[in-house]
Image (cartoon, grey):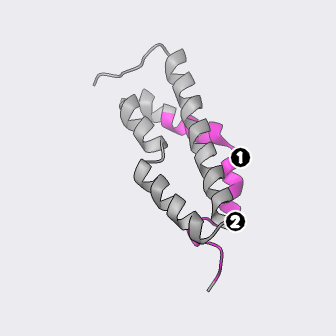
Amino acid sequence: MATMPQFVPADGLQELEYPQREAALFYGLFLRGHSADELRRDIEVPSAVLAKWHRESEHDPQLRDIFTRILDYRRHVLAIFDALVGSDGQTQRIQ
């Protein structure tokens, strides 16, 4: 079959250019009462996934750039989200 991984469509990589949109989505969830810590966990890439990506990139070096780009994007989303939550003066919401 195709050599490109099926879970990262080529047009999907263009969405990695707009971390503000995703951060705004998570901030909206925060404003609706979701826990900031839970949302941060949703934004971050879990260590188990990082380990899997590392193993996969050893077998297919082309994946390394894709995984690096995704990881940088997720970190950028998290930084924007943290700035939004911090600017609101609320680090934790109580329901």
Residue drawn at x 36%, y 36% is 38
Q: Is residue 63 above or below residue 71?
A: below
Q: Quadrant of residue 62?
A: bottom right
Q: Which residue is mark 1?
A: 17
**Residue 19: x and y, percent?**
64, 40
Disc 2, SS: helix
Q: Amino acid at mark 2?
A: Ala
Q: Is residue 69 magenta?
A: no
Q: Nearer the viewer, residue 84 or 57?
A: 57
Disc 1, SS: helix
Residue drawn at x 63%, y 44% is 72
Kindly give the residue lying farthest to the bottom in the view shown. Answer: 1
**Residue 90: x and y, percent?**
43, 16
Q: Quadrant of residue 48?
A: bottom left
Question: Which residues make up the magenta segment?
Answer: 2-26
**Residue 17: x and y, percent?**
71, 46
CA–CA distance in space, label 1 to label 2: 13 Å
Q: Is residue 14 magenta?
A: yes
Which numbered disc flags the more N-terminal residue, 1 or 2? Answer: 2
Q: Amino acid at mark 1?
A: Glu
Q: Nearer the viewer, residue 49 or 42?
A: 49
All told, the count of numbered labels is 2
Kindly give the residue lying farthest to the left in the view shown. Answer: 95
User: Which label is found at residue 83?
Assistant: none
**Residue 76: x and y, percent?**
61, 37
Q: Main secondary structure of the magenta part?
A: helix
Locate the C terminus and report the quarter of the image it occupies.
Answer: top left
Residue drawn at x 43%, y 43% is 42
Question: Horizontally, is 30 left or right of 56 in the view?
Answer: left
Residue drawn at x 35%, y 22% is 93
Q: Nearer the viewer, residue 52 or 69?
A: 52
Q: Which residue is mark 2?
A: 10
